[in-house]
Image (cartoon, grey):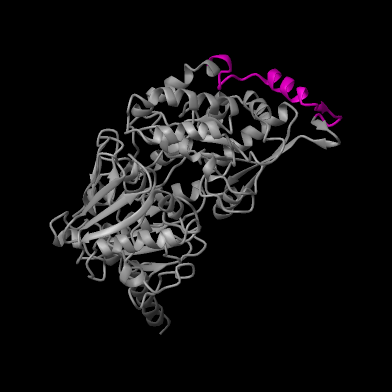
Amino acid sequence: MKTKISVSILIVVLLFNLQIACRSSDSGKPVSQINDERRQTVILDIEGGRVINPQMWNPFLPGVRKDQGFHQCMIEPLFMLNFQSGEIEPWLALSMIPNDSMTEWLLKLRPGVAWSDGVPFTAEDITYTINLLKANSPILSWSAKVSETVDTVIKQDSLTVLFKLKKRDPRFKLDMWSVRMASSCPILPAHIFRGQDIMSFKNYDPVRGWPVFTGPYKLKSVSQTEFIYERNNDWWGAKAGFKPLPKPRWLKWVWYGPEETRTAAMASHKLDAIGDISLGAFLALKRKNRDVIAWLEDFPYASIDPCVRNLEFNCAKAPWNDKDMRWAVNYALDRNLIISVAYEGTSFPATTFFPLYPPMEKYIGMAAKTDYYQTCPLVSYDPEKAKKIIESKGYRLNKNGYYEKNGEELSMTLTAPENSIEIIRIAQIVVEQLQNIGINATSRVEGSGVYYENFAFGRFEGCIGWSTCASVNEPISSMDIFSSRWIVPVEKRANANGWRWKNDEYSRLVDEMKTLPLNDPRSDSLYIKAISIWLEELPVIPLTQAKKLIPFDTKYWKGWPTAKNNYFQPFSWWNSSHRIIHNLEPVIQ
């Protein structure tokens, strides 16, 4: 009897184990189904970290996140600037042409574009969006730029819009509509947003199918750490013959946490793209997963990021409102050490706030040849000179080894966002170097949302950041961020120039440059004068060119952008990620 019972129990256990083997331990789905879903799903890293408010899908509200798939697969741009070719590629639009004076721009939309609920995308959506932004400036994102630039917007027919500008603007198409840097001005579905309170409307209602945008994917589920999108097989692009449906059936953006957990996920093929990791982590990952690739096949593996890393001052707060004190800090910094430790040798010192892209090399070289740069080379490491400047301001070393004046130690708190190990490392190295010359420096890691808010409202002394990020093919975009016209008091949100640096002559020169067409040789002399003023004042300290070591897993998907397959920039968290998604092909059919 005992033998029969034991056999019966054994059979039950075997059947149970067989059942478990055919199902996922965490989802209850058969393994075959899970494997099929994985082969149809692209999983990407949420580059900016945890999303605190996952039900916010109004793209213009301050602090809204769009790097969790929002503008990679739902919000489509009018145009995209291709860094590799230098061309502005049409997407939702066909063309945007200025008049001779560049005070009017005529926009032609692509026929057949529709919102994901089937309603046609028309000129009415453009005019509605622009007028909404003008009426809510400067509170909404993009509203300050629109209000400053656009006088009137006129719907000429369902596919044609005329922009009448307040003044000549040769860069209107590039700056606002071409994903020059990370994103472009989104267009809202007028039939959904009209009548809503724009300051409180979240645009999230799964029952109604919201959010509605023109992209080829619809939102299926959200949380602070995971967003899932399903392909819309009725996407306008396929129906209109613009592009075939993208191959992935599902897109998933996931925040796995710090670098070690993200790379562990990719090592086990649970993540197809990571925003950026260190060299050491990448090499360790490649040893575990031979399917991993990056922009370059060999060292340094990384691509150049468009955003130079800086030490950025609050120029409204003493003593960092004194240009001499800012230069003292500059002389205290050994950029080669920063690169060795924070980048493991994979980057280069920054001599300006421009990225080291071919179109920008001319302007970087011109800055280095200015009289001021020749006298005061930006990348000079001279701690003794730093100390002499500080002492010339009346500071003396106290018993703790820190400079002091009027009973107050010379100190600085440097902030860094929690989602960037690179920035945190830079901050730690800078703090150590400032400590070495007698500045009682400390670093503070903040949640990414808090970090950006504090910068905008002027609630910081110094930070390690990249807020000069704008220029990729000409210098004006980044230079304009420093314009005096952006300055607002501390505790009021700044839309640009969060450093609150003021120089009217610099601003006048930049404004004059802005009236000239792209790459007009007449702007060179203006540029030299303006960059000389900037170098003398040094409102931020350019530290390093930034690398982006972006690993892609090729086990399930191929077609990722690389130096050999350089159809587009590899930044999977940008609004231009549509180009990457449409280029992906399944490895296993």
- Counting from the top left corner in percent of width and height, residue 403 is at 79, 30
Query: Along the line of sight, which residue is nearer the eye, 244 or 197?
Result: 197
Residue 116's quadrant in the figure?
Answer: bottom left
Query: Along the line of sight, which residue is nearer the eye, 257 or 245?
Result: 245
Left or right: 333, with 290 as reference point: right
> Up-down: is 505 above or below 19?
above
Residue 33's quadrant in the figure?
Answer: bottom left
Quarter of the image that includes the N terminus: bottom left
Quarter of the image that includes the C terminus: bottom left
- Residue at point 54% right, 28% down? 534
- Residue at point 26% right, 71% down? 117
Left or right: 436, with 337 as reference point: right
**Outermost residue, left direction?**
241
Magenta residues (range): 374-401
> Up-down: is 209 above or below 282?
below
Query: Along the line of sight, which residue is nearer the eye, 46 or 464?
Result: 464
> Up-down: is 148 above or below 335?
below
Left or right: 583, with 241 as reference point: right
Residue 57 lies in the magenta-colored region: no
Query: Along the line of sight, which residue is nearer the eye, 285 or 192?
Result: 192
- Counting from the top left corner in percent of width and height, residue 189 is at 32, 66
Can you see residue 447?
no
> Up-down: is 60 above or below 477?
below
Can you see residue 289?
yes
- Residue at point 55% right, 21% down? 379
Q: How many labels does the image show?
A: 0
- Counting from the top left corner in percent of width and height, residue 31 is at 30, 65
Residue 398 lies in the magenta-colored region: yes
- Counting from the top left corner in percent of width and height, residue 373 is at 53, 18
